[in-house]
Amino acid sequence: MSTLSRAASGAEPILLPPTGPAASFRRISALVRRYMYLLRSSGVRLVELIYWPFLQMLTWGFLQKYLAGTTSPLAQGAGVLIGSVLLWDILFRSKIGFSTTFIEEMWSRNLGNLLTSPLRPYELVAALSLWSVIRLGVSMVPVAIAAYFLFGFNLLGLGLPLAAFFAVLVLTSWSLGLISAGVILRYGLGAEELAWSLAFVLLPLCCVYYPVSVLPGWLQVIALSLPPTHVFEGMRSILLHHTFDPKELWWALSLNAVYLFAGYLTFSRFLASARVNGTLLRLSE
């Protein structure tokens, strides 16, 4: 029965949610504004965003300063330590921003409300991804400035490749965040530890602080299948040899496309399962 005939018969017309790119953008921006209001209303949240990356930068920065003042062969590579820490924090903080925001929706029992509203799942993912980048900027910009004034390390000294490295690491963090969110949807809040631990599983394999060549041959194959490995290899090449290999970047972007697809597929499958089984509104440990 059409809306007109329903209205003529006295029945209440059915109002469908607005569709199209403009409506989708409004829903995404509304969700991001909600997260901004939450951050603005809590000074503790804001301090926490800066505290841990700043503490880590100080620890590795002083170690770099010590190594640079010795005659050890390590002194030559000491300058890459802060660079490695800052780039790793881009990946880790973006991943944490995505995952913790999703988990907070579950803690507040608001996830079911969001997903029964006109908000589409891909719009939720887009809002979480955008918010993770905003959180990343809030946490990393002050730390990068402090690294310059305290230790003379200029992250912008990496030049144009820095933008590419940033994009690769953020894309990787989104794929990890999607996988974490999907697993939490499937197994409940008992699996929330995965939100923090998944990135650390990759830490030794991504060769953040050492080159791929130090790994056993069979492990090098696994390491090179991870996008961040190519970022850290590229960073060391720039800082130590003043050369940039674009092949590393293309490998990283290609691998990211695969992982992003796998991450979104995992999230979509587990979300559909939660809806069918009726567990979306009663997620718990």
Image (tube, rainbow, N blue to C red):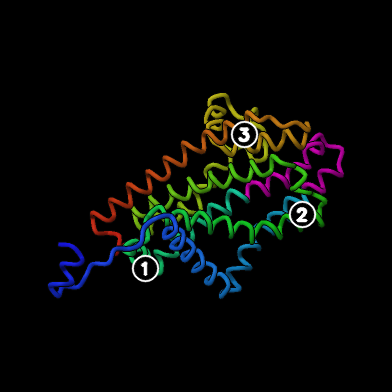
Query: Residue 228's image quarter?
Result: top right
Q: Would you say residue 284 is visible in this rendering?
A: no
Percent across and percent down for residue 260 are 46, 42
Name the element at disc 1. loop
Q: Is residue 228 visible?
A: yes
Dot 3 alpha-carbon crowd within 10 angstroms: few under 14, some 14 to 19, many 20 or more: many
Horizontal and vertical percent position of residue 273: 28, 51
Locate residue 63, reporting x and y percent: 77, 49
Is residue 68 one of those drawn in magenta?
Answer: yes
Dot 1 amino acid type = Arg
Farthest residue toward the left?
9
For the record, the magenta segment spans 64-89
Left or right? Give the position of 247 relative to 238: left
Foreground: 273 or 124? 124
Residue at mark 1: 109
* Image position of 109 with respect to 126: above or below: below
Q: Give the main secondary structure, helix, strand or loop, of the magenta stretch.
A: helix
Mark 3: amino acid: Leu
Say what secondary structure mark 3 lies in: helix
Which callout, 3 or 2, points at the residue further toward the start of the chain? 2
Quadrant location, the C terminus: bottom left
Q: Which mark is residue 194?
A: none
Is residue 193 one of those drawn in magenta? Answer: no
Judge depth for marks 3 and 2 and give the one in front: 3
Identify the mark at residue 249; answer none if there is no mark. 3
> Left or right of 114: which side holds 244?
right
User: What is the secondary structure assignment of the residue under circle 2?
Assistant: helix
Of residue 121 and residue 111, the one placed in the foreground of this image is 121
Distance in Å between CA atoms under marks 3 and 2: 25 Å
Give the residue at mark 2.
Answer: 147
